[in-house]
Amino acid sequence: MKRVTGIGGIFFKAKDAPALQAWYKQHLGIDVQEWGGTAFTWTDGEGKPVAGTTIWSIGSAQGDHFAPSTATFMVNYRVEDLHALVKALREEGCKVLEKIDDSEYGKFAWVIDPEGNKVELWQPPAGQ
């Protein structure tokens, strides 16, 4: 079974999210959208889009999306078979959170690494 196949997103908290979003937009040219981030579309060597995106997002330091972790970041990893990976991680003694989300955006689960960081696992919908 393949485990992680790529990075689906990078999320981090900021003391002043709107100001930091504006800095990245102005100085690094990231097309920060109203929701606080952007979706980078994957392309081939010729610049043609291929299936897949990577989300980049800055949120408020007050948010609890990373709980129970107290880290200021969370990485979302793409996986091929979320349920099989969650089962394997539990069998290996990893701290996997009970909740698994299934939505139009795909399937999501979370595991806490040995340093206490929340790691998001994402199985994209078919074709993405």
Image (tube, rainbow, N blue to C red):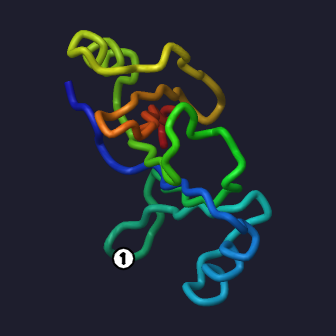
Side (left or right) of 16 relative to 79: right
From what the image shows, is residue 81 above or below residue 105? above
- Report the residue at 45% width, 37% height from top: 118
- Report the residue at 65% width, 31% height from top: 104
Side (left or right) of 95 relative to 21: left
From what the image shows, is residue 29 above or below residue 50? below
From what the image shows, is residue 14 above or below residue 66? below
Q: How many marks?
A: 1
Task: Choose top left, top right, bottom left or bottom right for residue 103.
Answer: top right
| Relative image position of residue 39 (x, y in whole percent) | 58, 60
- Report the residue at 68% width, 72% height from top: 21
| Relative image position of residue 61 (x, y in whole percent) | 66, 54
Badge 1 density bin: few <14, some 14–19, many ≥20, Cα 10 Å: few
From the image, tell me which residue sits under label 1: 46
Nearer-the-camera pick, 44 or 71:
71
Residue type indicated by callout 1 = Glu
Which element type, helix, strand or loop, lies under badge 1? loop
- Report the residue at 55% width, 17% height from top: 99
Q: Residue furthest bottom?
A: 27
Nearer-the-camera pick, 40 or 92:
92
| Relative image position of residue 122 (x, y in whole percent) | 46, 35
Quarter holding the N terminus is top left
Side (left or right) of 109 relative to 14: left
